[in-house]
Amino acid sequence: MSGDEAASVRPQHTDRTDTGLQIGMQQQNKAASAHNKTPTDLTARHGLVRGLQQWRKSVADFLKRSQEIVNNRFGVNIRDFLAERQPLVWLLALIISVAVAYSALAFRWLIGIVQLPWLGTQTERVASAAAELPFWQVILAPAIGGLIVGFLLDRYMPGRRAHGVADVIEARALHNSHIDPKTGFFSALLSAISIGSGASVGREGPIVHLGATLAAMVEDYFKLSPGARRTLLSCGVAAAVSASFNAPIAGVLFAHEVILTHYAFRALVPTVIASVAAAVIARVHLGNSVTFLIPDYSITSYWEFPAFALLGLTCAVVAIIFEIALMATDRVCWRFEMPLWLRTGLGGLLVGCIAVFFPQVLGVGYDATNEALQRELPLLLLIWLIVAKTAATAISLACRFAGGIFSPSLYLGAMTGSAFGLIATSAFPEFGSSQGLYAILGMGAVAASVLGAPLSTTLIVFELTGGYTMTIALLLTVSIAVGVTQAFLGHSLFYWQLGRRGLFLQEGPHKSIQRRLHVDDFFTPVDPEADAQHVQDKEAPWLMATDTLERALREFDRCGQPRIVVVSANDPTLIIGHADRLSALNLFNKALIDAAVEEHR
């Protein structure tokens, strides 16, 4: 190696040696530093680590125990709540209430549009406006309206009748809360024409059916469970009553008492949401005023309560006569065969003839009801108006005018109570309260007896009149009237209407379940690839897939066999499956249990 090369190599070796020395010194320093730490410092550090680990474990155990407690206590309920899509049901209840409230407003506006050409006003003061018209105009208006209603019924309505509250009850009990939208909207249109032309019917029943129709449309779109469908149906009804009467509490009770026929907590919340929202919308557009103007009144003496009880009996008599008149007129009317448009036209002509002498019978009659509450009608006129309104309403409904019975019931109750109060205060002036108080009590008693809804009707009267101080008197009068009416007739007018169709739903949920379920829900179909089989014995029992569970159970009981063939509707000899008695009973029991659970949750 040359001298130059040796010189160039030596510095590189020296650099590597210096670097090694530096690394070694650093390692020695670290070792010395670690060696110089005291035992106290090491113990503190290890204690801190163990403390952090224990704290982390405690937090994890706490969270785990909390989760177990929450799951054990609330998990099942929360899972059920979410599984039944209750948040969606609440939201849909609000949406339905908005749609129903504005539909109710539109319905009232449409009535005013129909009555404007012949009456000259869109207000509810029909009687005072009709009293100033020529008699021929009063006669012709309901007759022309009847011709139009009859023609539309004959051409476009299934069953040639408009639908109402009874059909909502039927939909809830038998048709999984489904209502045909065309039928619902067309019934509302026919009701507006009927009321606007002067037919003696109410507007609340059509609004209730319209609200139920809108709810059914929402139910169909979101594919909800049967229980949720019934809840939303009640929401539509509650919103309709609330918007129509400006009575949110009564709307909730009416939906539960008449439509659902139970008071389940699961259905209460969305029903309240719908009723309150509809009432708010109605008050925004119509104001916060009550429907009827109530004079000052007070209960003079508690000795007056026997008179209130006697008023209850009197109202029961009026309600019974009213319902019998509706039934009898319907039977008599349909004994005469004629085109439907002619029948409704003649019915309108008869109502017009009555209105020439008593214009107070036209339409919903709220102006005459207010006059009775204000003690502006003499005794003889009150009695005549009871007779005239009963006749006009019976003719209107029997001849197939579209409308409800709630307004006529309030009308008859106000007239009955006012007449009774006039007699009572005249006979016992030192004990008798005001005549207006008796009119309020009569309104509630007759309406509750006809509708079969004492609680909701009581609340409706409270909210319609703004009078809450006569609570105990109203409850006594209503209870006696409803009890006596049920003792004589055994049912409300709604259930009479259903009974005419062969539907006796007041017998209990087991009957409606038997009629709602069909053989198609439980029979076992045959293998479609197998050879076709036919019934050989003509005496052998058989069922069709469309038969109700009620008929199937009766057929099982009649023949005593555990299995019955199911035949085709097109070919009664072709066997399409077999129905087992045990499967039918299991389906029936499950439906009963589901109904009981729904009513108590």
Image (cartoon, grey):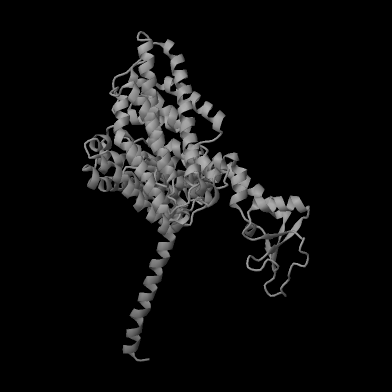
The structure residue drawn at horizontal position 23% and vertical position 37%, both measured from the top left corner, is 129
Kindly indicate the quadrant of the structure image that contains residue 104. Answer: top left
Residue 553, percent across and down?
A: 70, 51
456 relative to 130 in the view: left or right: right
The structure residue drawn at horizontal position 36% and vertical position 28%, both measured from the top left corner, is 384
Number of callouts:
0
View extreme (top): residue: 430
Question: Which of the pair 550/285 is nearer the observer?
Answer: 550
Residue 27, percent across and down?
A: 43, 62
578 relative to 308 in the view: left or right: right
Question: Which of the pair 389/212 is nearer the observer?
Answer: 389
60 relative to 540 in the view: left or right: left
Q: Quadrant of the N terminus?
A: bottom left
Residue 237, percent across and down?
A: 42, 43
Q: Is residue 9 above or below residue 405?
A: below
Answer yes or no: is residue 358 visible.
no
Question: Which of the pair 47/151 is nearer the observer?
Answer: 151
Q: Quadrant of the C terminus?
A: top right
The structure residue drawn at horizontal position 46% and vertical position 53%, both measured from the top left corner, is 179
Q: Is residue 540 above or below residue 498?
A: below
Answer yes or no: is residue 399 visible.
yes
Residue 499, percent across and down?
A: 55, 43
